[in-house]
Image: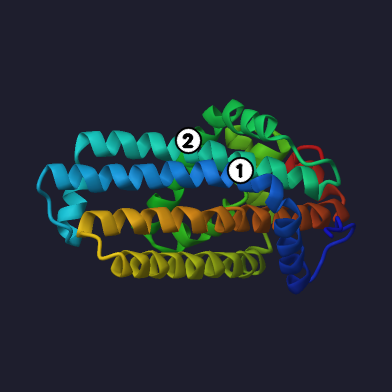
Amino acid sequence: MYRRPTEPLPNRGVIESGFELYRESFRSCAPIALVSSLLSAAFGMFVLDYAHRTGTGATALEMLEVYSEPPVMAAGLLQSVLSLAFYGALIATQNAIARGAAPLPFRQALGIGFTRLGRAVIAAILSTSLILIGLILAIVPGIYYLGALCLWPVALYADNAGAVQSLHVSRILIRGHWWRSSSILSVAGIIVFAFSIVAGLVGGLFATLGRTDSAAAQNVIELATALADVAVLPMVPAALVAVYQDLKLRAAGSGPTAKVAGLPGG
């Protein structure tokens, strides 16, 4: 049973809180994760089919050429934008539980995800641009922004912050806690990476046992990955919400910090 923290937790406590939030919210998050995973799988199959129809090979360089084709780029952009809305729906659902409220119905969660999608796209473009510019200019600033801006989706989807405000809130909350927050979120990232590898291996095994051709085998792997993503997708948002709530408790405990940061309510 998830218990909402009332005071800042040590690193292990935040990690455990994130896992408890994941378990408590999984039933509500599973339908959202399923639709998002099927969307990603559909895009993957579209790319494979496009490569097959154009006679493109399956090597890394040849697949890069496929991704540079206008139809694939357009489909990839659409898939990325829609996935951002589903990601927001996961955060909204988990944040409701983290605050002690009832889980959001499927339609309400998606409504929040899509209603705030416009500003989320702006925030994503701004944060990605800052990270890329930092990496290109001196590497270290890019790495810093990668950690400092990671909480903007929670500020936007959980506390209804604006696009620029969500970046500001994330940076203020992370200030002084960069290493700590990055290490906590890395745990979730490693688990997601491990699950993805296992899903790919299982999909490849099924394709081999079924003696399917190359194209069919790749489609099986896409579907296996999509099914695994149903369990995996809510992990990172749960970790982000747990870190966000912990840092807000720390900011509130420092008095003027919360006011200066302009933190949204909650």
Q: Amino acid at mark 2?
A: Leu
Task: Locate residue 104, reporting x and y percent.
Answer: 74, 37
The local crowd at label 1, few if under 14, some if 14 to 19, many if 20 or more residues have their Cα within 10 Å, is some
Q: Which residue is mark 1?
A: 31
Side of 6 where 103 appears, left or right: left
Give whichever of 166, 198 is nearer the camera. Answer: 198
Residue 167 visible in the current orientation: no
Task: Locate residue 248, reporting x and y percent.
Answer: 78, 52
Give whichever of 202, 119 is nearer the camera. Answer: 202
Q: Which mark is residue 82?
A: 2
In the rendered image, the vertical position of residue 193 relative to residue 78, given as above or below: below
In the rendered image, the vertical position of residue 7 relative to residue 166, given as above or below: below
Judged from the image, the secondary structure of the residue bearing numbered disc 1 is helix
Comparing marks 2 and 1, which lies closer to the viewer?
1
For the point 70% across and 45% down, the residue is 28
Q: Could you tell me which quadrant the N terminus lies in?
A: bottom right
In the rendered image, the vertical position of residue 6 relative to residue 106, given as above or below: below
Q: Amino acid at mark 1?
A: Pro
For the point 61% across and 64% down, the residue is 185
Mark 2 or 1, nearer chain start: 1
